[in-house]
Image (cartoon, rainbow, N blue to C red):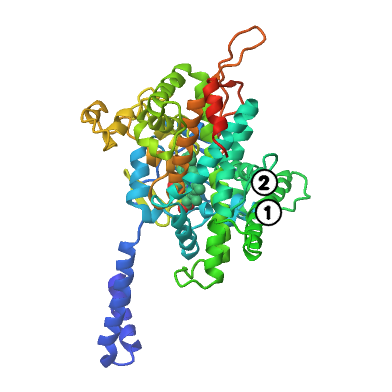
């Protein structure tokens, strides 16, 4: 049949050709077009490998999540499915990275493909956090903001803020003497005060500062909505159009309230700093320095930095900076209460090195045990147990699996920091876990045997990336965070004693608060007793004028 058909088709084709002279060019064009298509087809990425395994998902609810804390669910899945866990729900592709190797390979070594963020409907469209650098997808807008952030907070710049940090540490010690039972409120105030001074030149009021309260409310909203999929609208974006008066739309009403506060946080401290600048009453800070350069047309001013970039960058640093540090300092008080031996060991080093004075940042190199303690605090109960979500901008393969383009990639930092091979007895708080690594790295200590004592690579290594992120989106605030945590921790150890509270039966209460299940995780409230270590300690605090 085909044999008979061929001459007929060939005849028809020859008749159809305008003339035999055109046959050659026609054939060339045809071959080029078809050939190109074939090459493109061969080159196009396709599912050469299967998708990573993952939990079954129900049409309406996605995968079952028995725990409120997403990292606990991820942990259960990791046990069952391994280092990559993938699921898809209503067209949203989600990949959880459970191993440090996969995390570094994808976010750092192949960083370009994973440096963007997924569009988060709840956080960005409903709550209005589009001004935060943390939520920005890759592109010009992101570059301009990140540039300004780095200008002020990069490694070589951060020490400029140590003076402002020390003032807040002293204020904290003074306040703790007066009202030790309010230590959590005081931590909030001093953490916010540092960034408010650096960014807007704002000095916080002793009682009920409006910006400190605003920051607490705004961060509560963003951190709650942070874990991907907490709200259905993350999966079904059109739900954002649901009118807030509709029954069942309580989440929308609440979100609109938070949105108003987020706008206040973005606009009000900035407007105040700008007004101060115009009236000549400005304090030196990031906002006024940048605004002044912009208004005066300073030739060194980067023209990509306009008023909006300055405002957004300041609001990002305020939101990200105030709450993260609160979490770790609350954990610090919890550790002192729970583990008296840890407190005693830490105080021995502080007393030996400082000899009864308060610390400055220059003391850090001489306090390796305190440095180890700070890292252990950041590891034991990390501030951001699931980091921030990244986005796969193109299809990729890893470990024999395909990662489709458009996948939201969540690093399960909690699991990486509790890997029993990397951190033996991961749930135990070991103050000296990182001591030998720190001694081996501190050049002036010259402890030649520390490297050997530190053990094989990969065991108790300093977990910087798993704490602050890896690759192009790694935390740009980590240097100022480290400095402030070090100064707070050392100053408290030098001057105060934290002990357990007793119950009505006279028994000591061993506090075991659960941590909040949000993007930024804090310990719940717990009882403790905070007293000055000695009359000399009280004098030391009082002599240090604020
Ligand atoms: C203990 C304190 C802190 C911890 C543990 C922490 C942790 C993190 C983590 C895990 C990320 C996500 C990295 C990624 O996506 O791969 C991040 C991002 C970020 N952090 Fe921090 N952070 C801390 C303090 C701060 C402070 C004090 C600031 C500001 C002054 C800050 C500003 C930021 C910003 C702007 C981003 C977003 C970067 C981007 O999207 O490009 N952080 N942080």
Q: Which mark is residue 264?
A: 1
Please state which of residues 7 and 438 is positioned toward the viewer in this rendering. 438
Do callouts 1 and 2 mark residues in contact (Cβ within 8 Å)?
yes
Residue pictured at 49% horizontal, 31% vertical: 491
Neighbour tally class for label 1: few under 14, some 14-19, many 20 plus, Cα within 10 Å: some
Q: Position of residue 336 (x, y in %)?
A: 50, 22
Secondary element under disc 1, as helix, strand or loop, is helix
Res 184 seen here: yes
Q: In screen coordinates, is 532 left or right of 245?
A: left
Q: Measured along the vertical axis of the image, is residue 330 above or below residue 340?
A: below
Q: Measured along the vertical axis of the image, is residue 26 above or below residue 238?
A: below
| Quadrant where the C terminus is found in the figure | top right
Residue pictured at 31% horizontal, 72% vertical: 36
Please state which of residues 487 and 264 is positioned toward the viewer in this rendering. 487
Q: Position of residue 413 (x, y in %)?
A: 44, 37
Q: Measured along the vertical axis of the image, is residue 193 above or below residue 426?
A: below
Secondary element under disc 2, as helix, strand or loop, is helix
């Amino acid at each position: 049949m085909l044999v008979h058909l061929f001459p007929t088709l060939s005849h028809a084709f020859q008749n159809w050709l305008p003339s035999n002279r055109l046959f050659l060019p026609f054939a060339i064009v045809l071959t080029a077009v078809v050939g190109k298509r074939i090459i493109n087809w061969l080159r196009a990425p396709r599912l050469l490998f299967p998708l990573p395994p993952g939990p079954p998902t129900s049409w309406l609810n996605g995968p079952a999540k028995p725990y409120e804390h997403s990292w606990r669910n991820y942990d259960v899945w990791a046990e069952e499915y391994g280092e990559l866990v993938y699921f898809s729900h209503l067209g949203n592709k989600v990949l959880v990275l459970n191993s440090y190797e996969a995390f570094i390979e994808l976010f750092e070594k192949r960083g370009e493909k994973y440096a963007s963020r997924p569009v988060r409907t709840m956080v960005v469209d409903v709550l209005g956090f589009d001004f935060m650098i943390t939520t920005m997808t890759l592109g010009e807008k992101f570059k301009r903001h990140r540039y300004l952030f780095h200008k002020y907070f990069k490694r070589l710049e951060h020490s400029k803020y140590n003076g402002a940090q020390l003032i807040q540490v002293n204020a904290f010690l003074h306040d703790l003497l007066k009202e030790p039972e309010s230590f959590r409120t005081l931590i909030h105030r001093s953490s916010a005060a540092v960034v408010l001074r650096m960014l807007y030149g704002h000095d916080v009021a002793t009682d009920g500062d409006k910006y400190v309260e605003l920051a607490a409310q705004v961060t509560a909203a963003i951190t709650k909505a942070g874990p991907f999929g907490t709200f259905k609208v993350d999966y079904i974006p059109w739900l954002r159009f649901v009118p807030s008066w509709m029954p069942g739309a309580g989440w929308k009403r609440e979100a609109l309230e938070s949105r108003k506060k987020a706008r206040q946080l973005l606009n009000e401290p900035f407007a105040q700093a700008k007004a101060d600048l115009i009236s000549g009453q400005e304090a030196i800070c990031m906002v006024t320095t940048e605004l002044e350069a912009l208004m005066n047309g300073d030739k060194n001013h980067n023209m990509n930095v306009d008023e909006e970039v300055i405002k957004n960058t300041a609001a990002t640093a305020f939101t990200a900076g105030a709450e993260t540090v609160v979490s770790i300092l609350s954990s610090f008080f919890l550790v002192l209460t729970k583990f008296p031996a840890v407190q005693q060991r830490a105080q021995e080093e502080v007393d030996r090195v400082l000899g009864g004075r308060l610390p400055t940042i220059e003391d850090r190199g001489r306090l390796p045990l305190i440095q180890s303690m700070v890292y252990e605090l950041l590891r034991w109960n990390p501030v951001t147990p699931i980091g921030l979500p990244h986005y796969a901008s193109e299809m990729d393969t890893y470990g024999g699996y395909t990662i489709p383009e458009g996948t939201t990639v969540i690093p399960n930092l909690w699991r990486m920091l509790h890997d029993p091979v990397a951190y033996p007895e991961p749930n135990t708080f070991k103050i000296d876990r990182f001591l030998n690594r720190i001694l081996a790295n501190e050049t002036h200590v010259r402890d030649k045997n520390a490297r050997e004592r530190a053990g094989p690579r990969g065991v108790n290594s300093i977990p910087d990336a798993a704490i602050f992120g890896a690759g192009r989106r790694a935390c740009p605030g980590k240097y100022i965070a480290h400095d402030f945590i070090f100064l707070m921790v050392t100053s408290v150890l030098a001057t105060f004693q934290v002990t357990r509270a007793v119950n009505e039966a006279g028994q000591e209460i061993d506090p075991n608060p659960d941590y909040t299940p949000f993007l930024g995780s804090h310990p719940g409230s717990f009882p403790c007793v905070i007293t000055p270590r000695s009359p000399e300690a009280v004098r030391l605090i009082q002599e240090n004028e604020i």
